[in-house]
Amino acid sequence: MTSQRTRERLVQRLADKGVTNLQVLDTIRNTPRHWFLDEALAHRAYEDTALPIGYGQTLSQPYIVARMTEILLGAAGGRLHRVLEVGTGSGYQTSVLSQLVDEVYSVERIKPLQDKARERLRTLGLRNVQMRHADGGFGWPEAGPFDGILSTAAPRFVPEELQQQLAPDGVLVIPVGSQEQSLTLVIRDGDSDKFITQTLEPVKFVPLLSGTTR
């Protein structure tokens, strides 16, 4: 279940699907995904599939975690200092981000999930994560602006609140839509209120239950 060979197979699958960032692949390889699941599902941890974590939420498919992280890093053009994650969930995406950026600020609306995630990150010795129990659709304005924002839940539209929390040239990676969802990249044009939006590929995420209307 947790053998190095099993992890290597997962990383090879991600590379075969087009993930090319070696730092991201190394981080996926070295992060114990089985720690972020209940024991009954831990044997499936290194399958490239989403898995339930309770409360109607899921642990994202490893490909999606790797792809979104790769897009965030690539669009930013270098190491990110301050990143906001909308939807801590199990803490798996949080842990991947925390190994690749300087500071992670993660917002979660379901307190029991947040508590478990906090304990997992502590066990892994990841000390550069700040957590907040709050409505993720509105971000974390007091901690911004952010060089990058990554959302693990899908609003119907890109929330204006999140766009406004981007630093100059900041990058937002977010699934958008209801019945049909698309992974979307939003880049702030300098320090202006102009945002460049690009639709990337179809995805399926749990809905973002706030900040979904204009």
Image (cartoon, rainbow, N blue to C red):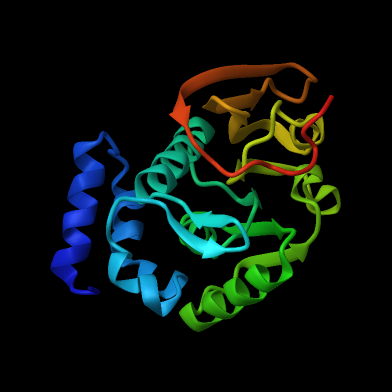
For the N terminus, the image quarter is: bottom left
Relative placement, left or right, of 203 versus 131 is: left
Rendering coords of residue 19 (x, y %):
30, 39
Where is residue 62 drawn, in percent x and y?
36, 51
Number of callouts = 0
Asked where in the image residue 46 lies, by quadrant, the reply is bottom left
Q: Residue at x 77, y 33 (%)?
A: 212
**36 to 158, vertically: above or below:** below
In the rendered image, residue 97, in percent from the top left (x then y), is placed at 51, 55
Q: Position of residue 214 (x, y in %)?
A: 84, 24
Can residue 38 be seen here? The reply is yes
Residue 32 visible in the snapshot = no
137 vs 122, nearest the viewer = 137
> Which residue is located at x 52 percent, y 77 percent?
120
Q: Is residue 139 left or right of residue 97?
A: right
| Residue at left offset 35%, top offset 59% | 27
- Residue 86 position (above or below residue 17): below
Most extreme residue toward the bottom, as rendered?
123
Outermost residue toward the left? Answer: 5
> In the shown orientation, is residue 56 left or right of residue 18?
right
Q: Quadrant of residue 56?
A: bottom right
> What is the quadrant of residue 70 in the picture?
top left
